[in-house]
Image (tube, rainbow, N blue to C red):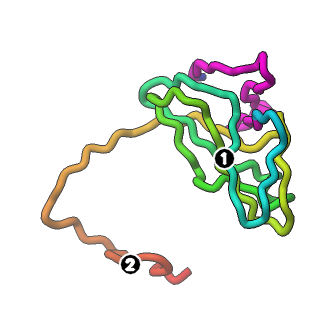
């Protein structure tokens, strides 16, 4: 278990992230709104959470969609997974997009996404003049026949 420090404006109604089951990898996060937000079909909105994190160096928090919200309403996280870096101290906001057939109302306290704490591996980039050969080579999208 990794300790993640969190500042939550709970006195104003923000909700601390919560794992809903003992085997859940993601903790649900909720909207923190003074009034409901309507996301028109085909549109997006940045939804505040009232949450601020201090993430240990070497870790990130990934923001991911909630499958129920996507399956039932066509609402998902636009930049998924979103990354909250260890040196970010601002409020976490979630970009929701409505791909459903109807406008969607986001209410205060509604579960809008989930967060996963994950280790980060830092790459060391080294410029070279050529790369090793592989069976796939430079084959891109669809190159494996699927």
Measured from the top left, where is residue 53 in percent x and y?
57, 25
User: Horizontally, is 12 left or right of 53 in the view?
Assistant: right
Disc sitting over residue 64 in the figure? none
Q: Distance between the residues labelled 2 and 1?
A: 36 Å
Q: Is the magenta stretch mostly helix, strand or loop?
A: loop
Residue at the spot of label 2: 139
- Quarter of image, res 135: bottom left
Against 104, is 27 above or below? above
- At a point 80% along the width and 47% down the height, the residue shown is 37
Question: First in sequence: mark 2 or mark 1?
Answer: 1
Give the residue at the far front of this rendering: 35
On the image, the x and y values in percent for residue 127 come to: 17, 55
Choose top left, top right, bottom left or bottom right for residue 71. Answer: bottom right
Residue extent of the magenta highlight: 2-31
Could you say which quadrant of the image residue 87 lies in? top left
Q: Quarter of the image for the N terminus: give it.
A: top right
Q: As drawn, which residue projects farthest toward the bottom?
A: 145
Is 17 one of the magenta-colored residues?
yes
Q: Which residue lies furthest to the left in this view?
A: 129
Q: So how many labels did they put on this image?
A: 2
- Give the side of residue 53 with respect to residue 121, left or right: right
Mark 2 neighbour density, 10 Å: few (under 14) some (14–19) many (20 or more): few
Instruction: Please give the residue where the numbered disc 1 appears in the rendered image.
Output: 46
Quadrant (top left/top right/bottom left/bottom right) for the C terminus: bottom right
User: Residue at left 75%, top 48%?
Assistant: 66
């Amino acid at each position: 278990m990794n300790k993640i420090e969190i500042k939550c404006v709970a006195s104003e109604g923000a909700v601390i992230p919560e794992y809903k089951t003992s085997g859940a990898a993601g903790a649900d996060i909720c909207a923190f709104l003074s009034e409901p937000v309507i996301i028109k079909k085909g549109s997006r909105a940045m939804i505040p959470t009232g949450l601020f994190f201090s993430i240990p160096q070497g870790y990130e928090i990934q923001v991911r969609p909630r499958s129920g919200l996507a399956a039932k309403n066509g609402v998902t996280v636009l930049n998924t997974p979103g990354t909250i870096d260890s040196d970010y101290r601002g409020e976490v906001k979630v970009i929701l997009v409505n791909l459903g057939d109807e406008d969607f109302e986001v209410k205060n306290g509604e579960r809008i996404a989930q967060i996963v704490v994950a280790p980060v591996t830092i790459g060391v980039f080294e410029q070279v003049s050529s790369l090793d050969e592989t069976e796939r080579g430079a084959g891109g999208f669809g190159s494996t026949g699927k």
